[in-house]
Amino acid sequence: MSLLNLVNRGIVSVVPLLPDTFIHKVASRYIAGETIDQVIQKAEWFKKQGVSSTINLLGEHVQNSGEADLEANEYVKLIKEVAEHKLSDDIYISLKPSQFGLTPKGEFYHTCKSLMRDVISTADAQDISSRIDMEDSRYTNDTLKLWKELHWNFPDLGFVVQARLERSLQDLQNLIHLKPNVRVCKGIYPETEQAYVKPDEINANFMRLVGFLMHHGCYTAVATHDPIIINAIKEDNFPKDRFEFQMLYGVDNEQLIDLAKEGYRTRVYLHYGDWERAKAYSLRRMKE
């Protein structure tokens, strides 16, 4: 085992022992609020800067159907608030399958699908778009299956591919005839599947995925903070109405605003949730 791996393992083992005050300080920069009202206020501020928003309720890997129902109900409340604040054309919601009951082994697939259909239908009725988020590779097959089955009723429904995974190009090739709306990101999960590890390999695959989607006329969300990729996308002169740049809240948001001023479509990814949700999310991000 390399020295770097030993150091990384040591850091990961210490993360759960960090005091709440430290975690809260770290989390506050990247969490857009604890309540729906707070995250809506952030979305309104970004709209004034010319930046659209994605809103995600923090939480994943629910333990039972009762918890999954509560997650779905919270999303319904969020959708209603987005509509009441007249932000329907500016916001879409992001949904994690494990938040609605799906397990790595595909258990509770139909429960997850039913709840997600209800949430997506509620959003669709308010002209709010939705995207199914991608978790680690244990969920990839079922996540793409969910998208394909729900897409027939909700043509604007999007999904995510991760440049870290070697399989991602093949996944797109299998679905390209459906002209999907796709978010391309690097991916942050430690993977058991075949995956690229070196940054230059991940970047090369990222550009390969974006190029493939653009060539086939698919609307593409380019989710990255990497200036190398951003500059490469700009140099390729893709039509500005066929893609958008996306970044996480709290990371390089000034750059996102600058891109909006340059005439690019932009979107900030806003996470919200109470302290326990924020703490769990922050610990996971620190480990990864």
Image (spheres, rainbow, N blue to C red):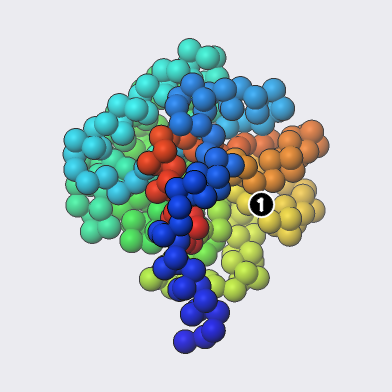
The picture places residue 51, in percent across and down from the top left corner, at 67, 31
Q: Is residue 103 among what the camera can see?
A: yes
User: Tag 1's secondary structure?
Assistant: loop
Query: Which corner quadrant of the image does residue 198 belong to?
Result: bottom right
The picture places residue 209, in percent across and down from the top left corner, at 58, 58
On screen, residue 190 above or below 87: below
Residue drawn at x 19%, y 35% as measured from the top left: 66
Query: Which corner quadrant of the image does residue 210 belong to?
Result: bottom right
Residue drawn at x 65%, y 70% as measured from the top left: 200
Query: Front-most of 82 and 16?
Result: 16
Q: Residues within 10 Å of mark 1 (few under 14, many from 20)?
A: some
Disc 1 marks which residue? Answer: 225
Q: Is residue 156 among what the camera can see?
A: no
Residue drawn at x 37%, y 41% as measured from the top left: 276
Query: Front-most of 124 and 49?
Result: 49
Query: Front-most of 50 and 237?
Result: 50
Residue type, mark 1 in image: His
How many numbered discs, if any? Answer: 1
On screen, residue 88 above or below 159: above
The picture places residue 201, in percent across and down from the top left corner, at 61, 71
The picture places residue 160, in percent across and down from the top left corner, at 48, 49
On screen, residue 207 above or below 76: below
Q: Name the side, left or right, on which 129 lies relative to 116.
A: right
Residue drawn at x 70%, y 28% as measured from the top left: 50
Q: Name the side, left or right, on which 271 lies relative to 16.
A: right
Q: Residue furthest bottom?
A: 1
